[in-house]
């Protein structure tokens, strides 16, 4: 059997990644809430006409939080699959993963405050 080309493999990779993104957005409440927050701050960016640099930082913050939420969800599902019974070690792994999302969320909130508080005052 012939090996598929690099381009075809990349197309399949994007296809599977998009599938995963839509599953995540449809099934996980936390990322749905974060998506709503992202829409609100994006709308605020247009309303307040934030600078190019502020857009870059805001979009990076949104991407970081949502990307980590996706990774957190994957870790939790993998942990549940590997050990369906309650296990303190799995609990710590899941807590650490959720903690990473919390750190990113707190810092993204600080970014939002730094961008928007001066525009509101």
Image (spheres, grey):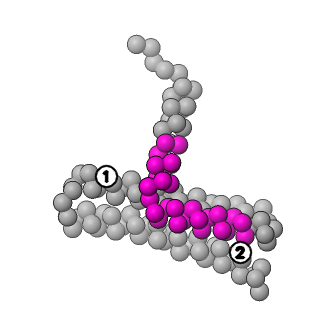
Q: Does residue 67 appear to the left or right of 56 in the view shown? A: left
- Residue 113, quarter of the rendered image: bottom right
Residue 61 makes an appearance in the image: no
- Residue 62, quarter of the rendered image: bottom right
What segment is highlighted magenta in the picture? 18-44
In the image, 65 versus 21, the foreground residue is 21
The count of marks equals 2
**What secondary structure is the stretch in magenta mostly built from?**
helix
The CA distance from mark 2 to mark 1 is 37 Å
Q: From the top left corner, tell me how far across and down residue 26 is, in percent.
A: 48, 53
Is residue 96 shown in magenta? no
The residue at the far bottom in this view is 121
Q: From the top left corner, tell me how far across and down residue 35 is, in percent.
A: 57, 62
Q: From the top left corner, tell me how far across and down residue 29 is, in percent.
A: 46, 63
Is residue 30 shown in magenta? yes
Q: Residue at x 40, y 13 (%)?
A: 1
The residue at the far top in this view is 1
Q: Which callout, 2 or 1, points at the residue further toward the start of the chain?
A: 1
On residue 115, which mark appears? 2
Q: Does residue 1 appear to the left or right of 9 in the view shown? A: left
Q: Residue at x 52, y 70 (%)?
A: 105
On residue 78, which mark appears? 1
Q: Is residue 2 above or below residue 99?
A: above
Where disc 2 sits, the SS reads helix
Where disc 1 sits, the SS reads helix
Q: Residue at x 52, y 36 (%)?
A: 15
Q: Residue at x 44, y 59 (%)?
A: 28
Q: From the top left corner, tell me how far across and down residue 59 is, in percent.
A: 65, 60
Label 2: few (<14), some (14–19) or many (≥20) C-alpha neighbours in 10 Å: some
Quarter of the image with the C terminus is bottom right
On residue 9, which mark appears? none
Q: Is residue 13 above or below residue 4?
A: below
């Amino acid at each position: 059997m012939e090996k598929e080309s690099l381009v075809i493999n990349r197309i399949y990779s994007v296809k599977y990644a998009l599938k995963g993104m839509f599953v995540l957005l449809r099934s996980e409440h936390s990322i749905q809430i974060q998506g709503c927050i992202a829409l609100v701050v994006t709308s605020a960016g247009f309303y307040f006409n934030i600078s190019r640099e502020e857009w870059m930082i805001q979009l990076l913050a949104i991407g970081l939080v949502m990307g980590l939420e996706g990774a957190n969800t994957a870790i939790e599902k993998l942990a549940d699959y590997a050990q369906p019974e309650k296990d303190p070690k799995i609990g710590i792994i899941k807590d650490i993963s959720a903690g990473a999302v919390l750190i990113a969320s707190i810092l993204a909130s600080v970014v939002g405050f730094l961008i928007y508080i001066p525009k509101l005052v």
